[in-house]
Image (cartoon, helix red, strand yellow):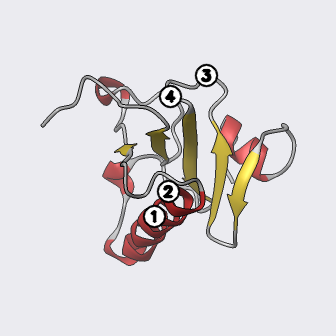
Amino acid sequence: MSDTIFHKIIAREIPATIEFENDTLIVIRDINPQAPFHCLIIPKKTIRSIQQLEPEDSHILMEMISTAQKLAKDNGFDSKGYRLIMNCEEWGGQTVFQLHMHMLSGTHLSGGFA
């Protein structure tokens, strides 16, 4: 396993507020939230970024999306909406080099792309 902050959280070497966990994923609260609800959906399998995903990892992406849908429903914003963001490598704004998805909601989010 790598030694990013996310790997240390998965290994319970660093504390975090865990919202959900199973054999494939861990979901934690962001320590610098950009919205009232801001979680990170992180695969436990070491994958640096979107660029390193392989076809056999497609189930991980689907599980990340399914988990986001469940979190939205459980937290009462499934009908109001939410934003999912995945950054890829330095130019794409990725700062922790383990694949992860940001999930934001809890207010009307401005600055959309479409």
Please indicate whether residue 110 sits to the left or right of residue 114 in the image.
right
**105 above or below 52?**
above
- Going from the N terminus, do you reach mark 1 or mark 4 first? 4
Picture quadrant where residue 57 is located = bottom left
Labels 2 and 4: the sequence-earlier one: 4
| Horizontal side of residue 79 vs 19, given as left or right | left
Q: Residue at x 46, y 69 (%)?
A: 66
**Relative image position of residue 37 (x, y in whole percent):** 56, 37
Quadrant that contains the N terminus:
bottom right
Front tag of 2 and 3: 2
The reply to whether callout 2 and callout 4 are in contact (CB within 8 Å) is no
Residue furthest to the left: 114
Amino acid, disc 2: Ala
> According to the image, label 2 marks what residue?
72
Near mark 4 (Cα within 10 A), the count class, few <14, some 14-19 or many ≥20, is some
Read off the residue under disc 4.
35
Residue 24: x, y in percent?
62, 70
* x and y, in percent, of residue 52 in the image: 37, 54
Q: Quadrant of the C terminus?
A: top left
Q: First in sequence: mark 2 or mark 3? A: 3
Residue 31 circle label: none
> From mark 1 to mark 2, how far is it between C-alphas?
5 Å
Whole-number angstrom distance, CA of label 2 to CA of label 3: 20 Å
